[in-house]
Image (spheres, grey):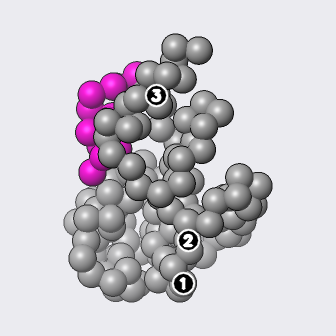
Amino acid sequence: MTLRKLRQQDPGLRIVYKELPILGADSLLAARAALAARAQGKYLELHEAMLASSEPMTRPAILEIARGVGLDADRLEADMGSSEITAAIERNRALARALNLGGTPAFVIGAEIIPGAVSLEALQEVIARTRGR
């Protein structure tokens, strides 16, 4: 997990995650679950656990992962259907369109946009360059 290592090495770094479901229904379900987990203070835990899982992100799999990170799965499932979650996903999609991002992951560091996965070293280099400005 590149971002986990980056957070550990640079605890003052602010990382903002934007859920952008691009792989169909399971992707949308996972995004809704991650956003709903914020209400229980476990966004990052669920986000990372889902990324680490090799299971398809079906509702039962997501709820099992949620229980594993200490979430109230019934509450999570209820929160996943909220209009606030739908609105957040729509805002994220609009932002991705505005930045011309068609996939994930993507990184915005200062004024630089980096589409696609990159190494820890590449991210550190862009962060250092941005901080130097």
Q: Is residue 79 visible?
A: no
Q: Which mark is residue 36?
A: none
Question: Circle 1 is placed at which residue position?
Answer: 24
Q: Which amino acid type is marked by label 2?
A: Pro
Closer to the camera in the image, 79 or 123: 123
Q: Residue at 46% across / 28% down in the picture?
A: 127
Amino acid at dot 3: Ile
Residue 40 is inside the magenta segment: no
Position of residue 98 in the picture relative to residue 89 (left or right):
right
Residue under label 2, please give it.
21
Label 1 packing within 10 angstroms: few (<14), some (14-19), many (20+):
few
- Indicate which disc, 1 or 3, sits on the residue closer to the N terminus: 1
Which numbered marker is on residue 127? 3
Residue 84, compared with residue 23, is above or below; it is above
Indicate the amino acid at tag 1.
Answer: Gly
Residue range (magenta): 1-12
